Image (tube, helix red, strand yellow):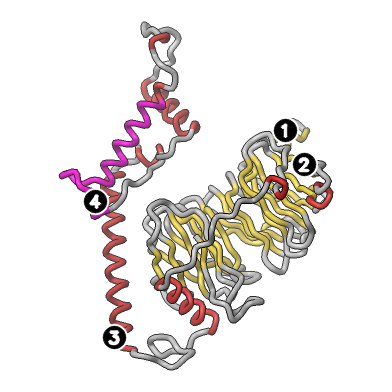
Amino acid sequence: MSISSDEVNFLVYRYLQESGNHISQSNINGALVPPAALISIIQKGLQYVEAEVSINEDGTLFDGRPIESLSLIDAVMPDVVQTRQQAYRDKLAQQQQQQQQQQQQAAGSGTGPQGSTKNGEPAANGEENGSHALANHHSEMMEVDRDVEIPQSKAMVLRGHESEVFICAWNPVNDLLASGSGDSTARIWNLIENSTGGSTQLVLRHCIREGGQDVPSNKDVTSLDWNSEGTLLATGSYDGFARIWTKDGNLASTLGQHKGPIFALKWNKKGNFILSAGVDKTTIIWDAHTGEAKQQFPFHSAPALDVDWQSNNTFASCSTDMCIHVCKLGQDRPVKTFQGHTNEVNAIKWDPTGSLLASCSDDMTLKIWSMKQDLCVHDLQAHSKEIYTIKWSPTGPGTNNPSANLMLAR
């Protein structure tokens, strides 16, 4: 269940508009109404809709499905119960189809020579070895690390932000840590200078132009990424602007073409392009040197949540529309589209070779995709809640540890 103040305010505002009422006086004794009464009754209503989505008429869970978490806006959408239940039925049917296809492929292929796929066609080493390693790890019990208590003397607390901190990113070259916060700032922390107990930080204030002056945007800074050389930091904000900063804290460029909050941004490995994803349903490739938009990709039908580069000019993006698009600079349509998730796709990540793409979703699954086929290579279903982040291990083909198995954390 998810309720935000913006959603509640919007629904109250809509009610006042539709009813034509602007209350100036009332016969209700406000002293008798407990605090947060509106939120309390909304929560109960939202729980009822969640139960409707997940429970059959006889009171049993819908096909063994756990209670689904809905946002407030999702819950008021027309036919939400029928739509969500049908989406889950479609997911089950797709899983059964995939299982049948895998069984047929296994029955028809037998044991093939090393370096070939199940249907006998040659495969790239990175994709074949990575997929095989994942399959092996999926069937074997993994050793679980024991809890390790870090002594207070080994911990460092960085204080300075005036609101919640959403994201942190290490500089790949220097001992610098960047952080983004709800106080409309990003900060760069020098940990070497901090080792004596001091607090050395550069404050990157995200301002907008109003009345000929720079004023704080008062918007969250929720995404940031260092370039591979560690000289420049890109930040994305809910004010709709991406910004490029030097490691010394100076603003180098402001990138402004999105029509709403920016949810994710990434440098490519070469360092000449920045990729951003926004609530306006688009992704944009920016020229990092000029600050100009090279190309805008309007292929999603809902907000774009995450992006990841496959190469210096090809990337993948995911969205609340449940789709994943692979796009290339200069192409006016997606190179590939993956469909299979039944809820919002929160994050995506290419493996070190760029052969396999992992995705995680509110549908509680993690899927692995290959550019060589439309259906997912693996559909991992071990979680009972939404999955928000994933990370490949720096092992396997294309890394400094090629003999180690490729692994995926979620």
Left or right placement of residue 239 versus residue 201 in this view: left
x 61%, y 55%: residue? 276
Sequence order check, earlier mark of 3 and 4: 4
Sequence order check, earlier mark of 2 and 1: 2
Circles 3, 4 touching at the beta carbon (< 8 Å): no
Q: Which residue is mark 4?
A: 62
Q: Which residue is mark 3?
A: 107
Sequence order check, earlier mark of 2 and 3: 3
Write down the quadrant of residue 351 in the picture.
bottom right
Point out residue 272 in the picture as x, y percentages from the top left corner.
73, 65
Range of the magenta residues? 39-64
Spatial distance from mark 4 to mark 1, Cα to Cα?
Answer: 53 Å
Q: Which residue is mark 1?
A: 210
In the image, which disc is placed on residue 203? Answer: 2
Spatial distance from mark 2 to mark 3, Cα to Cα?
Answer: 61 Å
Mark 4 belongs to which amino acid? Answer: Phe
Q: Quadrant of the N terminus?
A: top left
Q: Which residue ends up furthest to the left in the rendered image?
A: 58
Mark 3 belongs to which amino acid? Answer: Ala
Task: Return the residue nearer the eye: 121 or 331.
Answer: 121
Point out residue 352 in the picture as x, y percentages from the top left corner.
59, 72
State whether residue 131 is above or below residue 363.
below
Q: Is residue 55 magenta?
A: yes
